[in-house]
């Protein structure tokens, strides 16, 4: 996890340090029918590999920038399309520029026309492949994080609230809680068995103790268990209405504000 904190796409750096030379060599195999293993081949191969590293680093930096400015959560298709075209453009531009520059320095002339008709086409396919690797790494870590969060929350579900029932104090585990509602100055805990208990806590304090994966505060009055939610429908001005399963304790429809709706949608869709 220490490596993960240094790079959000670990192990992309060691992976591409190995993969770029392989790609460079494979491109030679596809482009040239007769390759002589001599010092000139070693020089040009090393130069092309260094150019490949430069283009990959620029593409990697652009992907990290997209993570901040256009995260996948704001639209997967939009992000992928823009990322693919932007990274391919910047990658091919860098490779073309550095290839032309090195050709002028070494040969005293521009790159061969076949570089643009054949080489760049093959390289563009590799950039699709590189983008796919980064997308897979991103969603692997997202899945891994969700799995870990669910495991932690499942352990937390065994805990619960101590509530008063007459003169007795009763332990209500979190997994037996349907939801919470504000009743006058108290918070009412609604259990799946139909019982209701009053808590001497605010809704904010209650939410802090509940497992995040299983409970969501819909508005100022209600917190609900994920297992109680059937779905949601859109209302005007970006608001939504959350539908609950049939029961008597909570309303069948609970409105969610425009500002809270996006976070609810992310939470509701985050199902392992």
Image (spheres, rainbow, N blue to C red):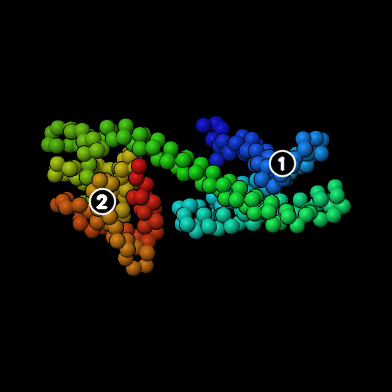
Q: Is residue 168 left or right of residue 72?
A: left
Q: CA distance from mark 1 to mark 2?
A: 54 Å
- Write the residue at 51% across / 56% down: 79
Per the image, the residue denoted by label 1 is: 49
Q: So how many labels did they put on this image?
A: 2
- Write the residue at 55% across / 58% down: 82
Looking at the picture, tell me which residue is in the foreground, 197 or 42.
42
Q: Nearer the viewer, mark 1 or mark 2?
A: 1
Per the image, the residue denoted by label 2 is: 229
Looking at the picture, tell me which residue is in the foreground, 28 or 1.
28
Q: Quadrant of the C terminus?
A: top left
1 versus 132 height, above or below: above
Looking at the rendering, which quadrant does residue 35 occupy? top right
**Residue 126 placement (x, y as % from top left):** 61, 48
Residue 119 visible from this viewpoint: yes
Crowd band around label 1 with a 10 angstrom C-alpha radius: few (<14), some (14–19), many (20+): some
Crowd band around label 2 with a 10 angstrom C-alpha radius: few (<14), some (14–19), many (20+): some
Residue 161 visible from this viewpoint: no
Farthest-out residue, right: 108
- Write the residue at 81% across / 49% down: 102
**Residue 114 placement (x, y as % from top left):** 73, 55
**Residue 205 placement (x, y as % from top left):** 33, 43
- Say what secondary structure mark 2 lies in: strand
Counting residues from the N terminus, which is met first, the one under dot 1 or under dot 2? 1
Q: Is residue 268 left or right of residue 87?
A: left
Contact check, label 1 and label 2, Cβ < 8 Å: no
170 versus 79 height, above or below: above
């Amino acid at each position: 996890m220490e490596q993960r904190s240094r790079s959000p796409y670990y192990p992309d750096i060691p992976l591409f340090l190995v993969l770029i030379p392989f790609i460079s060599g494979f491109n030679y195999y596809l482009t040239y029918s007769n390759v002589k293993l001599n010092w000139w081949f070693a020089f040009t191969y090393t130069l092309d590999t260094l150019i490949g590293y430069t283009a990959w680093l620029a593409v990697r930096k652009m992907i990290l920038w997209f993570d901040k400015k256009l995260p996948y959560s704001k639209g997967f298709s939009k992000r992928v399309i823009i990322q693919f075209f932007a990274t391919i453009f910047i990658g091919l531009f860098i490779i073309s520029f550095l290839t032309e520059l090195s050709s002028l320095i070494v040969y005293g002339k521009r790159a061969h026309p076949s570089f643009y008709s054949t080489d760049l086409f093959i390289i563009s396919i590799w950039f699709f492949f590189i983008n796919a690797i980064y997308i897979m790494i991103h969603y692997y870590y997202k899945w891994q994080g969700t799995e870990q969060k669910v495991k932690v929350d499942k352990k937390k579900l065994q805990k619960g609230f101590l509530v008063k029932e007459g003169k007795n104090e009763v332990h209500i585990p979190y997994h037996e809680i349907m939801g919470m509602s504000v009743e006058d100055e108290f918070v009412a805990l609604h259990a799946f068995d139909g019982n209701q208990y009053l808590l001497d806590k605010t809704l904010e304090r209650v939410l802090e103790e509940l497992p995040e994966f299983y409970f969501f505060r819909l508005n100022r009055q209600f917190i609900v268990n994920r297992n109680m939610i059937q779905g949601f429908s859109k209302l005007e001005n970006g608001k939504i209405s959350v539908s609950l399963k049939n029961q008597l304790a909570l309303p069948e429809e609970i409105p969610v504000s425009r500002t809270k709706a996006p976070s609810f949608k992310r939470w509701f869709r985050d199902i392992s």
